[in-house]
Amino acid sequence: MSDYSAAKAGIIGYTRDLAAENGRHGIRVNAISPGGFERGQPEEFIRRYNSHVMLGRMGRDGVDLKGAVVFLASDAAAYVTGQNLAVDGGFTAWS
């Protein structure tokens, strides 16, 4: 897990740095951190994972990231930059 954690922290830091460097040019930079998505994992894994998610389920491919992407790409997010948006059904809110 340490390699995943290091990579994730690097992406979030890079997002913040890019936002700081490019904001004066009107360029917004944000990241999306998706939670687990069901992709044929064993049923027991899915059951255990779901028990740790506030919404009680894994993400759905082609469905659950769309809203976040549309929001961040739209004028509704015109004052949002340097942020990491967790789209994980509440998984990380427990910690």
Image (spheres, helix red, strand yellow):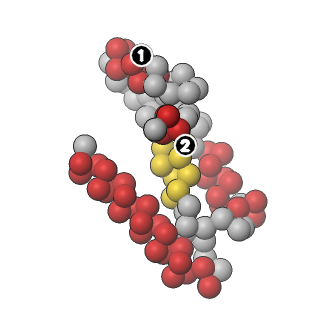
Q: How many labels, in total?
A: 2
Q: Where is 26 relative to 41, above or below?
A: below
In which quadrant will I find the N terminus?
top left
> From the viewer's perspective, is 95 left or right of 42?
right
- Asked if marks 1 and 2 touch (Cβ < 8 Å), the reply is no
**In the orientation shown, which residue stands out farthest toward the right?**
76
Q: Amino acid at mark 2?
A: Val
Mark 1 highlights which residue?
47
Is residue 43 in sight in this rendering? yes
Q: Return the x and y of residue 65 as percentages of the image width and height.
A: 57, 43
Q: Amino acid at mark 1?
A: Arg
Q: Return the x and y of residue 27 as percentages of the image width and height.
A: 61, 76
Report the residue at 35% width, 62% height from top.
Answer: 10
Q: Return the x and y of residue 5 as percentages of the image width and height.
A: 31, 50
Q: Where is 83 relative to 43, above or below?
A: below
Q: Where is 42 relative to 14, above or below?
A: above
Report the residue at 46% width, 74% height from top.
Answer: 17
Please tell me whether mark 2 sits on a helix, a strand or a loop: strand
Instruction: Give the spatial CA distance, label 1 vs label 2.
Output: 19 Å
Mark 2 highlights which residue?
87
